[in-house]
Image: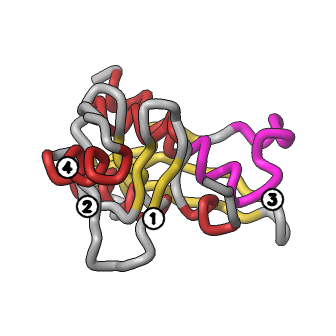
Amino acid sequence: MEESIFVTDFVTYDIAKSLKDLGFNEKCFGYFNEKKSFFHHEHPQAFYTRNDSVESYCTNIFSKRVTRANACQAPLWQQVTDWLRIEHKININFDFVGIDSCSYIVENLNKIDPNFSTPEFLYVSDMSKSEDFISYYNARKYAILKAIEIIRNK
């Protein structure tokens, strides 16, 4: 399938696979197959989940069985930040430095400082590594990866 700008709205395969391993099981507009290729459906009513509906859809389209082990959902970036906040009480905030640069903060919503009504910081990105945070999109990616790492290490 030809890649388009549309594909950039979805997380990468590696992030999607990590989310699957953490229990992500939300409805998605797309998925990755066993070869890490991205597929989507043009119709909003056609959602993909990690359950049998994805496997049935893949079997019909590709005439072969796609198992849970080799396919995973492809959520939108915003869908992931919402899922982290709702399911794991982890929030991601961004601190913009100019138009194209920003850093990020990963916060624990389970621990709110009563004096300031702010969440506990689990991680604050290092602005001295400016090559990693040249854009909002890179900061968003690294913030989600850091949140995944934090959840895995709980």
x then y, percent, for residue 15: 48, 38
The answer to whether the residue labelled 3 contacts the one labelled 2, judged by CB atoms less than 8 Å apart, is: no
From the viewer's perspective, is 88 left or right of 96? left
Say which residue appears at 43% left-offset and 31% top-offset. Answer: 34
Outermost residue, left side: 52
Residue closest to the eye, 111 or 66: 66
Amino acid type at circle 2 is Lys
Secondary element type, mark 2: loop
What is the CA distance from the residue labelled 4 to the residue labelled 1? 27 Å
From the image, tell me which residue sits under label 2. 27
Q: Which label belongs to residue 115?
A: none
The crowd level at tag 3 (other Cα within 10 Å; few <14, some 14-19, many 20+) is: many
Amino acid type at circle 1 is Gln
The answer to whether the residue labelled 2 contacts the one labelled 4, judged by CB atoms less than 8 Å apart, is: no
What is the CA distance from the residue labelled 1 to the residue labelled 3? 19 Å
The crowd level at tag 1 (other Cα within 10 Å; few <14, some 14-19, many 20+) is: few
x then y, percent, for residue 16: 43, 41
Q: Which label belongs to residue 56?
A: 4
| Mark 1 or mark 3, whichever is nearer to me | 1
From the viewer's perspective, is 49 left or right of 7? left
Q: Within the magenta stretch, is there residue 135?
A: yes
Task: Establish if 122 lies above or below 119.
Answer: above
What span is in magenta? Answer: 126-143
What is the CA distance from the residue labelled 1 to the residue labelled 2? 13 Å
Outermost residue, front side: 63
x then y, percent, for residue 80: 40, 55
| Mark 4 or mark 3, whichever is nearer to me | 4
Which badge, 1 or 2, comes first in the chain's sequence?
2
| Mark 1 or mark 2, whichever is nearer to me | 2
Task: Establish if 19 lies above or below 136.
Answer: above
